[in-house]
Amino acid sequence: MGDFLASVYPWTKSLHVISIIAWMAGIFYLPRLFVRHVESVEQRSETDLLFQDMERKLLKMIMNPAFISSWVFGLMLVFTPGVVDWSSGWSWVKAACVLGMTWFHHWCGWRRKDFVEGRNTRSGRHYRMMNEVPTLLMIVIVIMIIARPF
């Protein structure tokens, strides 16, 4: 299995990066939709339904497939011999941040359901602040992968 993963490494890495770009685009955009939704849209209006539809499609058609493929190709990279040195601290920090990003993805899904069920209690400010979480996680992940500081 290790030989196969090593032979497809450039393809796996390419598909992982493509998946991450798509996932991050959605992770950055969905909370911004939530901000506009909560600040500019009256509940049970036609615009409310439009926002719910946009949020659902972004999550279900872009973010979820990108999330799954990011994990699949990421795990393939983890199991490729020589790619990850688990004795180094950077790999554990990166793994923790990936788990944090995964939690944020699910948090967005839970918040979308709040809008659908008409029980959102969070403000636009809350969504703006939460939108900084994936930015911080992304910065740490990129530094861990590229600089490998420890």
Image (cartoon, rainbow, N blue to C red):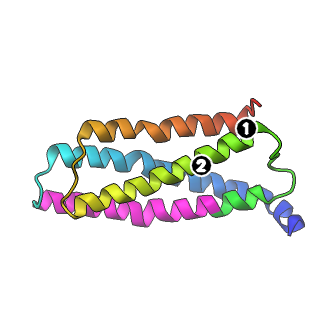
- Of callouts 1 and 2, the N-terminal one: 1
Q: Which residue is mark 1?
A: 90
Give the total number of marks visible in the rendering: 2
Q: Badge 1: few (under 14), some or many (20 or more) residues near its Cα, within 10 Å? A: many
Question: In the rendering, at what x and y percent does residue 54 appear?
Answer: 29, 60
Q: Residue 145: name its quadrant.
A: top right
Q: Quadrant of the C terminus?
A: top right
Q: Residue at x 80, y 63 (%)?
A: 8
- Magenta stretch contains residue 94: no
Quarter occupied by the N terminus: bottom right
Decide if residue 27 is on the left or right side of residue 87.
left
Q: Residue at x 11, y 61 (%)?
A: 44
Element type where label 1 sits in the image: helix
Of the residues shown, which amino acid type is indicated by label 2? Val
Residue 142 relative to residue 121: left or right: right
Which region is colored magenta? Answer: 46-71
- Near mark 2 (Cα within 10 A), the count class, few <14, some 14-19 or many ≥20, is some
> Where residue 99 sits in the image (x, y, percent)?
58, 51
Residue that label 2 marks: 98
On screen, residue 144 above or below 30:
above
Q: CA distance from mark 1 to mark 2?
A: 12 Å
Q: Tell me residue 56's x, y (percent).
A: 33, 64
- In terms of image quadrants, where is residue 32? top left
Q: Main secondary structure of the magenta part?
A: helix
Residue 70 lies within the magenta run: yes
* Residue type for callout 1: Trp
In the foreground, 149 or 21: 149
Is label 2 in a helix, a strand or a loop?
Answer: helix
